[in-house]
Image: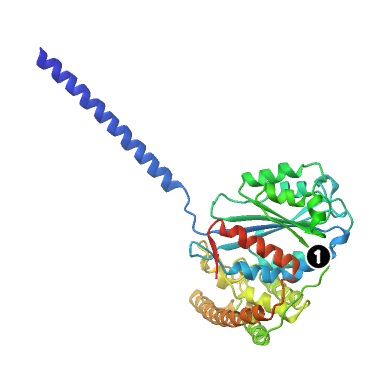
């Protein structure tokens, strides 16, 4: 009898252990499945939302944004995150303009996050100023609600808001807006266009500090200083060759080629050196045109030549076979990479020349943004070379 009881107890104990082992195994398998189902982050991003006051007094600010865009982008192109070059996305808002809808708080989302830098340039050059009410809290909260900031902790997520009226205006309390930004891991940087102390008394500094950002004051009416270098003419000649490597396709192809050249002209309208800055951007990994250029599109995972229709192609490729089109695109890619490498080499010499001849950081918006970007990027282990 005792033997039977002992056997029964032993069997029960073994059953319990076996059950626990099965449960532990199931938990481990479920955890592994959950881990495998979580999408791997392949690329990191620098996400910059630029919120510009377009009221009457802000013509100088808009001019600085147009003239300094490419140098800001170029500085970001030198950044590294975990030994990889992060991508760049820019969003653009305007606020404080009487031409905007009062029901929306006199704000307008111009562009959501985009990697199309020609689009950013085009929209900047289309901005006009008009008197209005500047609601900083409203535009910050709108950018938080409307933009896809993502969930990658390694992404650098930043708002830059520039203006010159009190930060306290509008129905949305700026403190609520910037604290919401902090919850989303979005840093709010404020750029007051005017006297530094006036910006503090107008709560621009407080707005930045609450969201771990930087407060800066600039003279927005100072013209941008572009430093010419001995390498400019050669780089601009390379830009002409670079433009020849684009292979437009689809409905937007021809329009995008025209827009690319229009933005070349817009940059050149400020100075030859600014056109050079844009060319340097076009030679970097941040200048992407996969929506209309076959050379860039071919590198996308979901791209297939089988999806292309004859009418999607430029005239010189419409009578070609798929293998002939591939060969042509490969040839253009090799030529582009050769030109981009040459631009990068010349730009390194240009950077050294400018550093040696630059007396001070006189470009307000550019200097303020780059200073804040680098400072905050260090907190996430971004490095510059």
Please indicate, yes or no, whether residue 136 appears anywhere in the rendered image.
yes
Comparing 44 with 258, the one in front is 44
Image location (x, y in percent) of residue 306 = 51, 66
325 vs 59, nearest the viewer = 59
- Estimate how packed mark 1 is, as few (under 14), some (14 to 19) or many (20 or more) residues with alpha carbons within 10 Å: many
Kindly identify which residue carries mark 1.
220
Q: Position of residue 112 (x, y in %)?
A: 68, 56
- Colouring convention used in this rendered image of the protein: rainbow
Q: How many numbered marks does the figure carry? A: 1
Q: Is residue 89 visible?
A: no
Q: Residue at x 78, y 77 (%)?
A: 269
Q: Which residue is drawn at 17% across and 19% down?
A: 8
91 and 315: which one is in front? 91
Secondary structure beneath label 1: loop
Instruction: Find residue 97 and report its image quarter.
Output: bottom right
Above or below 95: residue 172: above
Residue farthest along the top direction in this orientation:
1
Q: Is residue 236 above or below residue 293?
A: below
Relative to 168, is 28 on the left or the right? left
State the image coordinates of residue 283 (x, y, percent, origin top left): 60, 76
Query: Which of the 4 quarters of the picture holds residue 231?
Result: bottom right
Q: Position of residue 214 (x, y in %)?
A: 68, 55
Quadrant in which the C terminus appears: bottom right
The quadrant the N terminus occupies is top left
């Amino acid at each position: 009898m005792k033997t039977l009881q002992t056997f029964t107890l032993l069997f029960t104990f073994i059953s319990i252990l076996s059950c626990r082992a099965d449960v532990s195994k199931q938990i481990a398998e479920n955890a592994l499945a959950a881990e495998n189902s979580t999408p791997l982050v392949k690329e990191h991003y620098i996400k910059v939302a630029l919120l510009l006051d377009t009221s009457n007094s802000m013509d100088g600010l808009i001019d600085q944004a147009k003239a300094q865009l490419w140098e800001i982008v170029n500085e970001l192109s030198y950044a590294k995150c975990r030994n990889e070059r992060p991508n760049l996305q820019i969003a653009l808002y305007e606020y404080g303009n009487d031409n905007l809808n009062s029901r929306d708080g006199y704000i307008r989302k111009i562009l959501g996050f985009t990697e199309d830098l020609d689009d950013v340039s085009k929209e900047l050059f289309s901005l006009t100023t008009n008197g209005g009410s500047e609601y900083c809290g409203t535009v910050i909260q709108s950018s938080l609600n409307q933009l896809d900031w993502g969930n990658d902790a390694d992404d650098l997520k930043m708002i830059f808001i520039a203006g010159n009226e009190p930060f306290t205006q509008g129905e949305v309390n700026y403190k609520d807006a910037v604290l919401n930004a902090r919850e989303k891991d979005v840093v709010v940087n404020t750029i007051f266009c005017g006297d530094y102390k006036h910006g503090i008394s107008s709560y621009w500094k407080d707005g930045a500090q609450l969201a771990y950002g930087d407060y800066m004051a600039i003279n927005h009416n100072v013209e941008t200083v572009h430093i010419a270098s001995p390498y400019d003419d050669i780089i601009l000649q390379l830009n002409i060759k670079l433009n020849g490597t684009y292979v437009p396709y689809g409905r937007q192809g021809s329009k995008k080629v025209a827009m690319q050249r229009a933005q070349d002209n817009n940059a050149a309208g400020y100075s030859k050196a600014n056109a050079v800055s844009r060319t340097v951007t076009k030679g970097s990994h941040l200048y992407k045109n996969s929506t209309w250029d076959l050379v860039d599109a071919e590198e996308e995972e979901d791209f297939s030549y089988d999806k292309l229709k004859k009418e999607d192609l430029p005239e010189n490729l419409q009578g070609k076979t798929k293998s002939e089109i591939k060969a042509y695109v490969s040839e253009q890619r090799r030529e582009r990479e050769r030109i981009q490498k040459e631009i990068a080499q010349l730009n390194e010499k240009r950077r050294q020349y400018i550093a040696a001849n630059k007396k001070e950081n006189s470009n307000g918006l550019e200097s303020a943004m780059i200073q804040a970007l680098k400072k905050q990027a260090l907190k996430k282990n971004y490095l510059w070379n």
